[in-house]
């Protein structure tokens, strides 16, 4: 595939080292090598990048733009090497030079421009789009600070700024010549022109320059390089004139510069809870306006078509409601800049924009105060108002049966703009991210919209890129797979299904087991290095890694650990398969209860891990600063994948897919994509427990769940809660009272107590299954075999053929 021998690669490396870093090989640090190898890879990518763009232009290819406030891309060097076919050569070259490739790759700072699932999904999608040779690009914000770095001090989460751009980021190219201007505030006037049409003029707006930085998105060994365009907010040249003015103006200028640069200053660290912060709204409009201006400009130069035909060539997929101002912004640009009539503009807009919903949690639904949008984006507000007016009138006249529901359907209601409603009304496709999630949208959360627009709703079950999450992070497993079924699975992940033929093949099972053992050893070393704790490599590695949220129920997990600990204390000779419980999770900085749970996990860990009387049968590990790179280390070593959300709450989950693909067995509820995993692997190859979605929703509706009853009848539960309440796991007595009160006096909103008993039972089944090595290995292989369905290649093919209509 590539032109370099190991020797040639080493020569190139030496040459670049001297020219770019003024260093000889002997003196080069790992960082020097990182930068130099990145530059070699960039040289490989750039001609392909240019060719790809030219091809799209020449062929007037239909293109999709994936608009997202988050792209959690992690490190890129290894991926790009793999995609160029240079990974093996590079690794061999480094080894020959006595260098450890991992140590070199580690010098890349994770690009943590996302919170969790939604941002990582965007990154996996870009990978699949390019690898399947589709014309699709990402558009996001170049936050100067990514998601905070987490430190834990005495069990407390501390947030440190993530200044990921401190050193040069080698993958980006600044494209100053493609900057556009974004306007905020000011006044709008509508004038009637001679032909009777209205014209909008803007006065005294604050102008901000949006400067794009392009990052290449390479496809897997197919010569395709698409673009992730990240926009940065800068002071507009018009305003810069102040610089030469008198002193007061100078300071005013500095102040203004500061507030402009704030727009791309940092990523908001909340996920799943909406706060109406003005700066966040600015960020959203900044992303949307710059992206769509860029698209229109490019459309005019590259396509020999009128803008009225935009929908034939352009799709804008919006990742949740965060970029839903795309609807009024596209309307605005078409009407105010391109002289479209309302109906014409509406026709284009609603055929270009498609919306993906990622949550039904009511607290996460975006609703902006009317006054905030009016002040910050007066023209946009006028347009939203008009969309709303027409939409409500349409219901009034054409859907009498829904007249009463207008207040629940209106885009503007109770002095707020409801962004999900705007997104549904303004787009041609609305999709959920797993089968059950889409069903809940259609039957419950968005029921009336589904009645209005049945053909818009569709499901696209999430996926993950198997290139990163198997091939790259687990090379030994990948080799073992290729050894038996050949390499076709890399291009066609569905081929992993052939592994079923080896699910009784003892030598293969043993090989898979050795690989897992090796990965567990590596993780054990990392755990030791990071926490000082020694864990038993033979123990069950039971893993829960995801954002910390009540609905994800890390609390249920730690309650089980406390239960096991209590059992061992009562009976130290209890025959228990040793377990290592591994957690990693960031909590939103203002999410008090989530932070309490982190603290509880740490306090339990410090008691359990130091208690000699339990003979190392239990260990509790919390790895701090969960991010993509840490996930890459943990996932290949997982035996059990904890996916224990309250049923109906987790839209899909994607960590479940990553761990399944690496041979872990899911222990989970019937929620999100767990259900689809279960349907594939069958009940014997997964551990399912607890309430299902219907039961949960019925409890909520009927209000007939009483947590206190369980506290009073289940001694195990009472003991744990009393231990919390009496400060047995706290430094002082008051610690963990909030958790206690939340469960007993707020009636356990996420059914931790209700699912406690079935969860314990399920863990007992896990333990029993693990004792029978061969059965376990067979389960593991079965999971890997069926995981091909969860490659994001499958997901992207579905988007491309059913929504985007790409070739
Ligand atoms: C929500 C909000 C609320 C407003 C403030 C800022 C903010 C930032 C991010 C979010 C994201 C919430 C939605 C989300 O992340 N959903 C997750 O999407 C994954 C990919 O589809 C899916 O696997 C998870 O189940 C779902 O929770």
Image: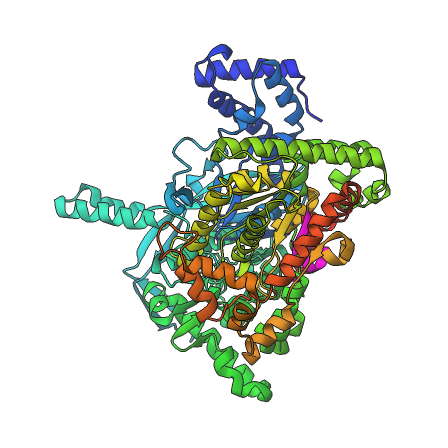
Specify whether residue 806 is in view: no
In this view, 793 is above or below 525: below
Q: Nearer the viewer, residue 315 or 273?
A: 273
Q: Give the left or right position of residue 446, taking residue 740 as reference.
A: right
Q: Which residues are magenta?
A: 665-677
Rendered residue at 68%/45% (across/down): 664
* Outermost left residue: 247
Q: Give the left or right position of residue 440, taking residue 177 as reference.
A: right
In this view, 506 is above or below 569: above
- Colour scheme of the rendered structure: rainbow
Rendered residue at 56%/26% (across/down): 102
In which quadrant is the N terminus drawn?
top right
The picture places residue 453, in percent across and down from the top left corner, at 63, 74
The picture places residue 18, in percent across and down from the top left corner, at 47, 13
In this view, 217 is above or below 792: above
**Does the segment drawn in magenta span residue 391?**
no
The picture places residue 206, in percent across and down from the top left corner, at 30, 56
Q: Nearer the viewer, residue 755 or 348?
A: 755
In this view, 707 is above or below 228: below
Q: Nearer the viewer, residue 427 or 142?
A: 142
Rendered residue at 40%/31% (across/down): 167
Specify whether residue 177 is in view: yes
**Does the segment drawn in magenta span residue 668?**
yes
Count of numbered tags: 0
The picture places residue 49, in percent across and down from the top left corner, at 59, 36
Q: Nearer the viewer, residue 481 or 644?
A: 644
Q: Quadrant of residue 616?
A: top right
């Amino acid at each position: 595939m590539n032109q370099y021998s190991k020797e040639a690669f080493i020569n190139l490396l030496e040459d670049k080292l001297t020219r770019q870093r003024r260093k000889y090989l002997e003196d080069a640090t790992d960082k020097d090598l990182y930068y130099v190898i990145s530059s070699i890879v960039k040289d490989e990518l750039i001609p392909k990048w240019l060719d790809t763009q030219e091809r799209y232009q020449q062929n007037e290819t239909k293109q999709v733009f994936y608009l997202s406030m988050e792209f959690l891309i992690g490190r890129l060097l290894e991926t790009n090497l793999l995609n160029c076919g240079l990974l093996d050569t590079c690794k061999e070259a480094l080894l020959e030079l006595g260098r450890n490739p991992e140590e070199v790759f580690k010098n890349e700072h994770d690009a943590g421009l996302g919170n969790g699932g939604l941002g990582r999904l965007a990154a996996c999608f870009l990978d699949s789009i390019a690898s399947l040779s589709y014309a699709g690009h990402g558009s996001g914000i170049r936050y100067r600070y990514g998601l905070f770095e987490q430190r834990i001090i005495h069990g407390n989460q501390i947030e440190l700024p993530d200044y990921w751009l401190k050193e040069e980021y080698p993958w980006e190219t600044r494209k100053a010549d493609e900057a556009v201007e974004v306007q905020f505030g000011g006044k709008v006037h509508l004038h009637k022109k001679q032909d009777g049409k209205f014209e909008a003029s803007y006065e005294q707006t604050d102008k901000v320059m949006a400067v794009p930085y392009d990052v290449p998105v390479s496809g897997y060994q197919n010569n395709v390089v698409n673009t992730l365009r990240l926009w940065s907010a800068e002071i507009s040249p018009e305003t810069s004139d102040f610089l030469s003015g008198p002193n007061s103006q100078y300071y005013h200028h500095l102040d203004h510069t500061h507030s402009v640069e704030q727009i791309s200053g940092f990523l908001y660290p909340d996920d799943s809870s909406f706060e109406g912060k003005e700066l966040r709204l600015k960020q959203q409009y900044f992303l949307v306006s710059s992206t769509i201006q860029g698209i229109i400009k490019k459309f005019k130069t590259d396509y020999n078509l009128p803008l009225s035909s935009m929908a034939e060539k352009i799709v804008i997929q919006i990742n949740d409601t965060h970029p839903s101002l795309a609807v009024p912004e596209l309307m605005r640009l078409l009407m105010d800049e391109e002289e479209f009539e309302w109906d014409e503009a509406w026709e284009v807009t609603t055929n270009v924009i498609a919306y993906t919903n990622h949550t039904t949690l009511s607290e996460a639904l975006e609703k902006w105060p009317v006054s905030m949008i009016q002040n910050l984006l007066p023209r946009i507000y006028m347009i939203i108002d008009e969309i709303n007016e027409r939409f409500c009138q349409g219901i009034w006249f054409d859907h009498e049966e829904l007249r009463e529901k207008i207040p629940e359907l209106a885009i503007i209601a109770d002095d707020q703009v409801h962004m999900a409603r705007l997104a549904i009304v303004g787009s041609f496709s609305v999709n959920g991210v797993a089968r059950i999630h889409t069903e809940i949208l259609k039957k419950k959360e968005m029921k009336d919209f589904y009645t209005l627009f049945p053909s818009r709703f569709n499901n696209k079950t999430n996926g993950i890129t198997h290139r990163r999450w198997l091939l790259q992070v687990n090379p030994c497993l990948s080799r073992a797979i290729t050894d038996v079924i050949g390499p076709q699975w890399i291009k066609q992940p569905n081929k992993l299904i052939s592994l079923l033929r080896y699910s009784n093949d003892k030598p293969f099972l043993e090989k898979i087991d050795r690989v897992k053992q090796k990965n567990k050893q590596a993780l054990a070393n990392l755990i030791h290095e990071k926490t000082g704790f020694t864990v038993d490599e033979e123990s069950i590695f039971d893993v829960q890694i995801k954002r910390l949220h009540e609905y994800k129920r890390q609390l249920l997990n730690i309650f089980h650990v406390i239960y096991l600990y209590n059992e061992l204390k009562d009976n130290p000779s209890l025959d228990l398969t040793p377990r290592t419980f591994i957690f990693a999770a960031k909590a939103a900085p203002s999410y008090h209860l989530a932070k309490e749970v982190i603290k509880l996990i740490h306090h339990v860990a410090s008691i359990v891990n130091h208690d000699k009387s339990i003979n190392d049968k239990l260990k509790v590990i919390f790895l701090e600063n969960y991010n993509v790179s840490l996930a890459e280390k943990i996932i290949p070593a997982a035996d059990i994948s904890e996916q224990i959300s309250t049923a109906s709450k987790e839209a899909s989950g994607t960590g479940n897919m990553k761990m399944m693909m690496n041979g872990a067995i899911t222990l989970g509820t019937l929620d999100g994509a767990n259900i689809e995993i279960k349907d594939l692997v069958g009940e014997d190859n997964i551990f399912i427990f607890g309430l299902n979605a219907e039961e949960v929703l019925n409890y909520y509706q009927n209000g007939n769940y009483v947590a206190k009853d369980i506290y009073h009848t289940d001694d195990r539960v009472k003991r744990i809660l009393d231990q919390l309440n009496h400060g047995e796991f706290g430094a002082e007595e008051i610690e963990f009272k909030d958790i206690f009160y939340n469960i007993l006096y707020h009636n356990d909103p996420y059914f931790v107590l209700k699912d406690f008993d079935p969860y314990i039972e399920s863990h007992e089944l896990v333990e029993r299954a693990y004792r029978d090595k061969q059965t376990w290995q067979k389960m593991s292989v079965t999971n890997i075999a069926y995981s091909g369905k969860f490659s994001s290649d499958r997901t992207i093919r579905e988007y491309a053929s059913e929504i985007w209509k790409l070739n």
